[in-house]
Image (cartoon, helix red, strand yellow):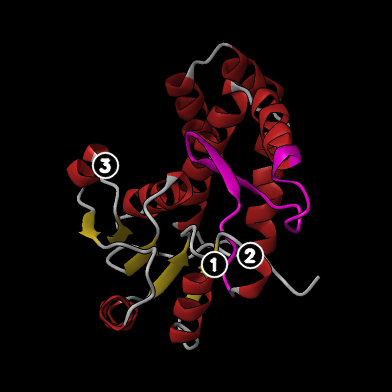
Amino acid sequence: MKWTSLFLKMENKKVFVLGSGEVGFRRAERFIDSKSEVIIAGNRSSKKLKQKGAILKQLNLENNDSYLLDELKKLVDWADLVVVASENQELNEQVSLMAADKLLNRADFPQKGNIIVPTKFNIDDIEISIYTGGKSPLIAKELRKRISKSITITDILQIELQDYLRNILKKKDLNQKKRKEILYEFFNDDNLKKLIQEENLEEAKKYILVKTDF
């Protein structure tokens, strides 16, 4: 597989979305929620996205005339990332060529772009993305449901405590190997497991603080 999963910091990045349909709006909202500047080109509007800060540029994407192409070229040049998600296949190809040196997500043909936007979900600080190589978005969604059901509150609390412990250990004169050993020791600590099962985060932190007083 010639793709690899990455997390991109999108804060203050400029994202141009071609197409104001369901897919275009969904992609736009995702990047807005990641603190990006987003402009959407199309003939539909979305009150929700406007309230979130998206700019909706009213353009008729059905006719590939010179005015439309000039306007789209300006938007492509402005953007750091271009999302192609219109219903006009010819226009999708033209805009993709304009964005040849940009980060490009093709909602219609993902393999033709250089950025994949997989299905994802968040539970507290956990984010999980699923991609099936474009073979089955339906199965990706089904897997998402199954995985989300398997993550419990104790997993969330364990993450919180591991972060708390890591910050304590970073302040001590310990090498990486020793810090790793201590992290595993606390992960398997029966007293700590009991406090986590009881969802007693504050007592668990006090327990860690006492045990790391060395």
Q: Amino acid at mark 3?
A: Ser
The residue nearer to you, when weighing 112 against 162, is: 112
Helix, strand or loop at label 3? It is loop
- Report, in whole angstroms, how far the alpha carbon at label 1 lies from the one at label 2: 13 Å
Helix, strand or loop at label 1? It is helix
The residue nearer to you, when weighing 107 against 203, is: 107
Return the residue at label 1: 89
Q: Which residue corresponds to the image point at 60% horizontal and 46% vertical from the top-left?
A: 119
Return the residue at label 2: 110
- Most distant residue in the right direction: 1
Q: Which residue corresponds to the image point at 44% horizontal and 77% vertical from the top-left?
A: 95
Q: Amino acid at mark 2?
A: Pro
Q: Earlier in the sequence, mark 1 or mark 3?
A: 3
Write down the region rendered in magenta: 114-139
| Residue 156 image point, x, y percent | 55, 30
Q: Earlier in the sequence, mark 1 or mark 2?
A: 1
**Is the residue under label 3 in contact with that under label 1 (CB below 8 Å)?**
no
Crowding at label 3, few (<14), some or many (≥20) Cα neighbours within 10 Å? few
Mark yes or no: residue 214 visible.
no
Q: Which residue corresponds to the image point at 44% horizontal and 57% vertical from the top-left?
A: 171
Tell me if 188 is positioned left or right of 9 in this view: right
Helix, strand or loop at label 2? It is helix
Return the residue at label 3: 46
Q: Earlier in the sequence, mark 2 or mark 3?
A: 3
